[in-house]
Amino acid sequence: MTNVLLIIFAMSLIYLSIANRLMSYVKILAFQGILLFGVSFIELGEMNPLNLAFILFETIVFKTIAVPLFLKYVIQRNEITREAEPFVPHFISLIVVTTIVVVTFLLSNTIEDVQLNKVYFVAALSALFTGLYIIGTRKKILTHVMGFLVIENGVFILSLAVGNEMPMLLNTGILLDLFITVLLLGIFVNKIGDVLKDVDVDQLRKLKD
Amino acid sequence: MTIPYLIGAIAIAISLFFNRNKKMNYTLVAIFLILQWAFTIYEYNHQNIVEFDYFLPDALGILLLLTISIITVPAFYHSYVFFTKNEDNPRNRAMYYASMVVLIFALSLAYLSNHIAVTWIFVEMTTLSASALIYHRRNVRTLEGTWKYIFVCSISITFVFIGILFLSIAVQEVGDNNLTFVSLLKRASQLDVFWLRLAFIFIFTGYTAKIGLVPMYTAGIDAKDKAPSPAGALLSSVLMNVGFVGIFRFYEIITHTSLHSWANNIIMISAVLSIFIATVYMIKVKNIKRMLAYSSIEHMGIVMLGIAAGGIGYYAAILHIIFHSFVKSSLFFQMGQIYRIYQSKSIYDVGNYFKYNLTGAMVVLFGFISATAMPPSGLFVSEFLIFRSLFEAHYLFVLIFVLLLLTIIIWAFGKNIFKLLFTPAVDFKDENIEHIKPYESISQFILLGLVVYLGINPPHQMVELINEAVKNLPL
């Protein structure tokens, strides 16, 4: 069952590469939150209840509800235009992200490890590189934040793979996730949105040599 | 004493944040300085005793802790000068001192931490506090610098976390779940090479944002430029050391596995590219503060060359990183005075500095000699040793290439510094310029003098500490 959820997660990354509107990105992020909830619910059954509740809270309340609502609020408040404005055509993005998934899949086949479920590895690394790709190829600062959230989802999956034995690492990772997301979005709403009106990266090019 | 220190420092930071009275602020800062030094002396006298499971004051930690405690004193003094000369908004001042206290204690504890995840947590805290310092002036430019810094550092800190996860997979396979450096070092040879390799790539890439190497060096440059000079001094010296600690401690583990020479190659590539990029930008750059920041990139490249070459290079790398902290911080402190005279950091607006501020110009000249590693600077000793180690490890082409780049760097650095010192500035009206008191430069002279003294005549305690810090590395 977790395998199915993780494969759907990898598919959502491919959809992310061709999504055109900012709201589609937000919806995909919310959907990924639900998938992560499912995976952690099934996978971490034996964990102590308090810890499990914390993790489930993070996925369902934070990743699925709070962050997407907050992103929606930011988009409306700053009147950001609804296109994602990539620098490259969607077709190329599609090929690149598919290549990323295929390469991580091939890489995972070289692992001679019986303990680790390779699907976790594939989903996590694909999310990491897709996030980096989105950060590199999209114009708006807000899409950079979304790319970062995709990377965080990948890290979450990876930490689930080791979470049963080392709950401390899993919790640290989740706290990092909460903390950085709040920090980045907080700055975005409070500062950048107020100072720079139509926010894309071209306005952040004053510091250079 | 780490936990009492942590609690005390957090209490001071919180009270600084909420208390905006000027006298109260400076009293709290003074208390923090006393706490910092008491902590340093205590840890120096209690080396190699594990505290609260997660902290171990080993030789490397003690050396860097002493470095930060020495630099902290002038950093607070120059911050005080900075606030008397600039308009003094109580809210921003309280925020500034609170973040500086957080930055210093997070760095100190990151040096001493013995657990890979604890180091990581304190490094994350340095990102947060440093960004509050960068945003101090609260305008569009600082906002841009802060955003880039937070974004790049967040990604790199995530990379480090991924590396730690890979490492934990390797550790679990041998039936363990202990991630302290001591235990990792013992188990190093049993760990699976595939996971270690991935872990090293991710941890190294992540920490390059802090140490200032290719590929993640970019955000640090803007940060050092946009932060107020005393904060910039901390960012370009002790904050870079924390990246070094992160890489060095993991590298120690890697040297006990079959990945040693592979890791050396990675470090070598990153170091040479860093020096190359520093050279390119040093020629081009027109902003003196950014030029100093690129010079830091170059020095970190040299440090990593020493690590990759091995042998005497390990010793020299640690010596170099300590000396570099003193030299670069004193140049950044001096930058504050230059800005007060010319109200500009651009090389086109400055000149004839000897005429307006004699003692300050002496610091700049002496700092230039030190930073380019000419004798009698201590950096000459450490750089010479690093080049010797490169020669002994048969990295001859790398050595020649790096020497060539360093020559270009000295030329570019010198060109800008001599323009600042001797050539009269165009259209500069010198009627109302501020007269800078000579005693404001004393701390810079002390730091630069310390580098000369420690280079020529290193006290045997320091030599022992450095030798102990590199004792786990193979010769």
Image (cartoon, coloured by chain):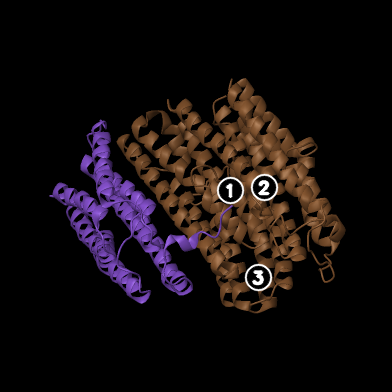
Chain colours: A purple, B brown
B474 is higher (above) or lower (below) than B112: above
Q: Say what secondary structure mark 1 lies in.
A: helix
Q: Position of residue B256 (x, y in %)?
A: 46, 28
Residues at discs 1 and 2 both on one chain: yes
* Earlier-in-chain disc, 1 versus 2: 1
CA distance for labels 1 and 2: 9 Å
Q: Residue at x 35, y 35 (%)?
A: B195
Q: Residue at x 76, y 61 (%)?
A: B337
Which of the two discs, 3 and 1, sits closer to the camera?
1
> Would you say the residues marked 1 and 2 are in contact, meaning their CB atoms lie under 8 Å apart?
yes
Badge 1 density bin: few <14, some 14–19, many ≥20, Cα 10 Å: many
* Earlier-in-chain disc, 3 versus 1: 3
Residue bearing mark 2: B325
Q: Position of A209 compared to B369: left or right?
A: left
Q: What label sits on residue B28 in the rendered view?
A: 3
Which of the two discs, 2 and 3, sits closer to the camera?
2
B425 is higher (above) or lower (below) than A194: above
Q: What label sits on residue B240 in the rendered view?
A: 1
Tell me the chain of label 1: B
| Front position in the image: B100 or B434 | B434
* Earlier-in-chain disc, 2 versus 3: 3
Q: Position of residue B56 (x, y in %)?
A: 54, 46
